[in-house]
Every structure is written in structure tokens, then in C-alpha cells.
Image (tube, rainbow, N blue to C red):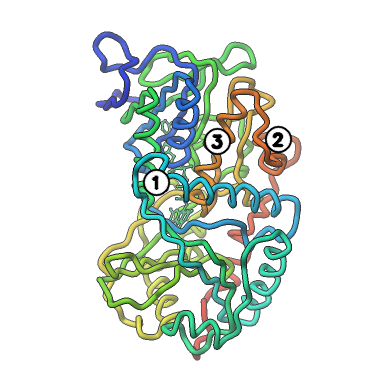
Amino acid sequence: MGRRAGGQTGVAAGTASGHRAAKRADVVVVGGGVVGCSIAYRLAERGRRVLLLERGHLAGGASGRNGGMTGAGTSLHGGSAAGRAVAALTSANLDLLRALPEEVGTDVGLRLPGTLDVAMTPEQHAHVVASVAAQRAMGLDVRLLDRDETLARMPALSGAVLGAAFASGRGYLQPRSLVHAFAAAARRHGATIRTGLAVEGLLRAGDRVVGVRADGAAISAGEVVLATNGYTRSVLRELPAGALVPARGTVRLTAPLPPLLPHPFGTNFDKEYGRQLPGGRVLFGGCRRYDEDEGLGHDQTRVTPAVLDGLARCLGDLFPSLRGVRFERAWSGIMGFTADGLPLIGRCQALPGLTLAAGFNGSGFSWAAVTGRVVADLLADRAPGFDLAPFRPDRFAAVEAGWANPFTAGERGHADVAPASA
Ligand SMILES: Cc1cc2nc3c(=O)[nH]c(=O)nc-3n(C[C@H](O)[C@H](O)[C@H](O)COP(=O)(O)OP(=O)(O)OC[C@H]3O[C@@H](n4cnc5c(N)ncnc54)[C@H](O)[C@@H]3O)c2cc1C
């Protein structure tokens, strides 16, 4: 790998020239997305000497290319132990996000008007009904709305809507602001953040991970944390193929419009989602089923005409007044999809010294803040107070990683958001 012009911010921990990374850190965090920056913040806050390495720029991965939707719970894991663990962690995440502006002195654009999960077909409606029941049983504030109640909340929706789940206290934030808020807070606590520096591999002493190799140089560390999301297998070859797969997602942005969509929304088994931004533009994402291989296994950001057409069609099906709307921009980003749709969070038992916080599928902003706390606890040998068993990073090692990710199930089977007559 060639040398890059690395940028350095934060407390100097490098050599005398200041142009190279520190040779030693308590903890090296790899990845400058929302998860890596959150972890760096919480570790530095507790006095650990942290070095964060990002090969591009902060928020240059999925964390700077997403819809910014954030919430708690999931409509996809039912009332299982995993579903309860997801609900506990994501609820704690939301609490941390609410407290963050005061804590770090930065407005990250968090607005929580409540979100709608809209059903346009009988299959989607059955799913929404079941997921409301499961989420309510876990204590989440989610209500089933009938057609008229749904239209009253969001009059721009198609009259073909069958109902919706309304989740109070969920909404959206400004993703880049959050990443930079975590990074700034990490620096204030003494973390060093190096951008433009790719980690090429892990340093090992026997089974133990003792640092990383970056820019041809060895950096030793007491602990290494990979927050590399969809790219994790390029650093950690031991991760079974299929356990964590890059997945390309695409969003489109309309020209500014008058106020139309008071609530962020999702539909079609969480496969499509959107919201109206403060400036009036409507952001709409999803339709991976029209991408090559449904976007799975692709780590190159590019947009394809089939996905763009699909997004325009789906948006018009949901909101008839948006048929033919002018789009200003589109972009894609690479997510990390796991074989079971749950993230990998925790120490790797087989590789002491290595911790993973990766594979946040389509919802990293509902996880990042609490993941910082959890990882800081784990690295201090303190119990984080959550059931982390469903997220064990080694869970795919013993068994073949069968692909049962609910975010991908039935992509092709749900080819259109709404019936053609809508
Ligand atoms: C189009 C789209 C829409 C989305 N919408 C939403 C949404 O509305 N709500 C939501 O919660 N989530 C959404 N997501 C998912 C969300 O963006 C991710 O779950 C989240 O950003 C994951 O954060 P991360 O820090 O784990 O990963 P990333 O932001 O991808 O960060 C990983 C970082 O690691 C760096 N890296 C990788 N390998 C190396 C290496 N070898 N050396 C150094 N650095 C390395 C990468 O450059 C990258 O910056 C969306 C994603 C996409 C693509």
C-alpha cells in the first residue's frame, strides 16, 4: 500500500516530526466513522491514551452518506432475546443522544417527531401489526395506526395506505455533526486522530493482537478496536466469509419542497426510508433489490440507473404528489451487513487484544453512542450492564455463517412498495 498524505489532529502523540503516527498507544481504534469516533471519545474520557486511525477522512464512509434516521428497537427481531437486547441497547443509545448536546456542547440536529413505518400491502401490514405487538411487549412506545389515523399524521401519503406503526420519540439527526462532535470530544480528552492513514494489518504475538501495521510502520497497542464496518474483513481475514459483508445503499435527494412530510418514515420491511430535511429537500433511500447482487458484496460507491429509477418510482407510489419530482443529487455508501442482521460488538475470544464494533447494518446511528460506552466498559473489564451475547463477534466461527439477515430477506420478493393501482 502506498504512502498517503496523512493529516493529524488532536494532541500530538507522534514522533518529533509530528507527521507520523504514534508508535504506541493504550488503544488503537481503526475507523473514523460514527462508531470509531464514539469509542475513541469514551475511551479517552476515561483516561486511555487513544490513537484513532482513519484511511480517508472522518465520516467519509457510511457515516457521512446515510439518512440520519435514529430510533430504538427494531421491527425485525420480534420478541426474541436478540430483539430484547437490541431494544435495551438502542433505547440507551437514544438516551445518550438526547443528553449529548449538553454534554459536548454541540447541536447534532437531533429531532424526534416520531416515525411512521407505513404498510402499503397486506404482507407489509401483517408485518407491521406483528412488529408493533412485539415492540410493545418490550416496553417500547409504538402504536398501530389505522388508515385514517395514518393519513391524518401524513396527509401526503397515497390513499392506498393500509396503516402504519407510529413510534414516539424517534426521529433523525445530522450524521456528520454527530461524528465530528464525538471526534472533537475525543480530542478534548487527549485522543489523537490521524486521517489518511490506512491500517494494513494486525500485529500479533502468538494469538495475541499487539498493535497494527499502518503506512508500513508498526504501532503497538495494549488493545486494538476495529470499527471498520463493511471493510472489516480486509483487516481481519479470520472473520468467516459471509459473516460481515459490504452492502451498497443509495439515497436520492429532491429539490427543496414546501413542508410535506412531518415524520420520517420507513416502509416495505425497512427496505425504503426517508424524511424531509430542514431545508425542504426530501431524502429517500433503499431499493437495493435493483442494484447488482442487491448491493451485497460490493464495496465500491456508485449509483446505478436501475436503483435511481426504482427510488423515483417508490417515492411516487408512496406520495403521489411527488411523482415526477425533480431530484438534485444521489449518492451511495457502503454498509456492513452481518449474516444475522445483528452487529458484532465485543472482545474476540480467539484473538486476545482485539475488540470488534462493526456490522451495524442499516442503523448505526441507533447504536454508535451506546457502543462507545460498552466498548469502554469492556476494555476496562467492567460489565456494561447489557446482554451482549447476541452480538458476540465470534458467533459465526463455530458454525457455518448461514445468511439469515432480515434486512435482505425477500428483497426481490417485495419488488414494489405499493400496488400498481396506488
Ligand atoms: C445510503 C445509506 C443510508 C443509511 N441510512 C441510515 C439511517 O438513516 N440511519 C442509520 O442509523 N443508519 C443508516 N445507514 C447505516 C449507517 O450509515 C451505518 O450503520 C453507520 O454509519 C456505521 O458506522 P461505522 O462507524 O461503523 O462505519 P463507517 O462510517 O463505514 O466507518 C468505517 C470507517 O472505517 C474506515 N476504514 C476501513 N478500513 C480501514 C483501514 N484498513 N484503515 C483505516 N480506516 C479504515 C473507513 O474509511 C470508514 O471511514 C445508512 C447507510 C447508507 C450507506
Label disc, if present, on residue 397 of the rendered structure:
2
Q: Quadrant of the N terminus?
A: top left
How far apart marks 3 and 1 lie (CA) works out to 16 Å
Instruction: Tell me the amino acid under the disc marked 3.
Output: Arg
For the residues labelled 1 and 2, the Cα–Cα distance comes to 40 Å
Say whether mark 2 is within 8 Å of ligand 1: no
Q: Which residue is mark 3?
A: 373
Would you name the residue on which mark 1 appears?
Answer: 101
Name the residue: 40% across, 36% down: 32
Could you tell me which secondary element the residue under label 2 belongs to? loop
The one nearer the camera, 337 or 112, is: 112
- Contact check, label 1 and label 2, Cβ < 8 Å: no
Q: Is residue 67 above or below residue 202?
A: below
Q: Is residue 309 above or below residue 37?
A: below
Distance, label 3 to label 2, CA atoms, is 26 Å
Q: Residue at horizontal 32%, vertical 76%?
A: 259
Would you identify the image quadrant in which residue 58 lies? top left
SS class, disc 3:
helix
In this view, the residue in front, 8 or 196, is 8
Query: Image quarter for residue 255?
Result: bottom left
> Residue 63: x percent and y percent?
41, 47
